Every structure is written in C-alpha cells, then in structure tokens.
Image: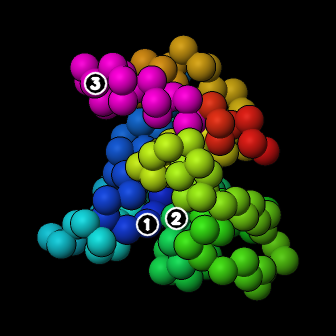
Amino acid sequence: MNKSFIISGSGGQGVISIGQILANIFMLSNKFVSFCPCYGAEMRGGAVNCEINTSDSELLCLQNEKVDFVIALNQASFDKFLSKVKENGTIIVNSSLAKINKTRNDIKYIFAPITQEAIKLGNIKMTNSIALGILSKLIGELSIDNIKKAYERILKNKTELIQKNIEAYLFGFNSI
C-alpha cells in the first residue's frame, strides 16, 4: 500500500495530533512512514497542515505534488488543498465549516458535518478524531488494536481523553 495524505485546518483543531496518530497507526502496521507538519508561529487559529506518506517499501520522497487523500477541516483548507488531490483521490470536507462545492469531477468528495457531530458528542475537540475515523473507513486495512495503541502513544497517560477520542474515531468510522 502506497498512500499519501494531507490533513489541514486551523491551529487548535488537532491537525498535527491526528497526523501523528495516523503516522503511528502505519508504523504499528509495519509500514514505512513520513510525517511533515507545517504551521506558523501563530498556531491557534492560524493555518496548519501536515503530510503523511506511507508505503510497504522505503519512501523516496517526503512530500508529493498530489496526494490520495485530503482532510479539510475548514474553508481555507478546502480552497487551498482541493487542487492537491490526485485524480480518483478523495477529499473529506468538514461541511460544518466549509461550503459544499464540487468543482472537480475526477475526485471523490465526502462532505460531513464533523464539527456539529463533535458538539453532539459533547466536545468540539473531537472533530479531528471523527475525521480520522472517516478517513480510516475509506483506507480500510487498519487494525483497531493499532489505532488504540497510536492514541495511547500520542495522548500518553490521559486515559479519559484517549477513550473519548477513540469513541469519536469509532463514531466517524461508523458514520459512512
């Protein structure tokens, strides 16, 4: 499996965290992985994105001109990264914060009210885990054990937070 991903949004939405979790899921699955975060000094509220690449063999490049999957958690991310999706690739769009706008016929769009669903679950900060669950459903092949281990690695000893994020992840996974 050779796949490339961009996860994007605003600082404070957990973009880097779910990028780290996704990279860890692939590492735990014995894949080669690269993780490249990109954010400004302003962080909270500013533009944030990360690129993850995974492969069954060694990676030759860390960043790609086009990627298989994009998660856009806000309008600015949708506008910026829509053109980076490969032909036949997929963009997952948080329709709570971005307009539904299909301008390309060569990709798959998944529009989901991710932020609204996180609020319904009781914590807006679960937006990122719901998005990761949706992405994981589309990727397939990921073990729930590795997903739990990845959350535990990144969120360390925050047991309650780990459990809530896993629940949000599973909600996203089962929502599509």
Give the CA separation, mark 1 to mark 2.
5 Å
Residue depth check, mark 3 versus mark 1: number of the one nearer the observer: 3
Q: Nearer the viewer, residue 95 or 105?
A: 95
Residue carrying label 1 = 9
Q: Position of residue 165 (x, y in %)?
A: 46, 33
Give the CA separation, mark 3 to mark 1.
24 Å
Q: Position of residue 19 (x, y in %)?
A: 41, 46
Give the CA separation, mark 3 to mark 2.
24 Å
Q: Which mark is residue 112?
A: none
Q: Earlier in the sequence, mark 3 or mark 1?
A: 1
The relative height of residue 27 versus residue 36 in the rendered view (above or below) is: above
Residue depth check, mark 3 versus mark 2: number of the one nearer the observer: 3
Q: Which mark is residue 73?
A: 2
In the rendered structure, which amino acid carries the disc numbered 3? Lys
Residue carrying label 3 = 158
Residues drawn in magenta: 152-169
Residue 172, image quadrant: top right
Q: Earlier in the sequence, mark 3 or mark 2?
A: 2
In the rendered structure, which amino acid carries the disc numbered 2? Leu
Element assignment for label 3: loop
Decide if residue 27 is in sight here.
no
Q: Main secondary structure of the magenta part?
A: helix
Left or right: 81 with respect to 175?
A: left
Visual colour scheme = rainbow
Q: What residue appears at the point 37 percent right and 41 percent down from the top-left corner?
A: 20
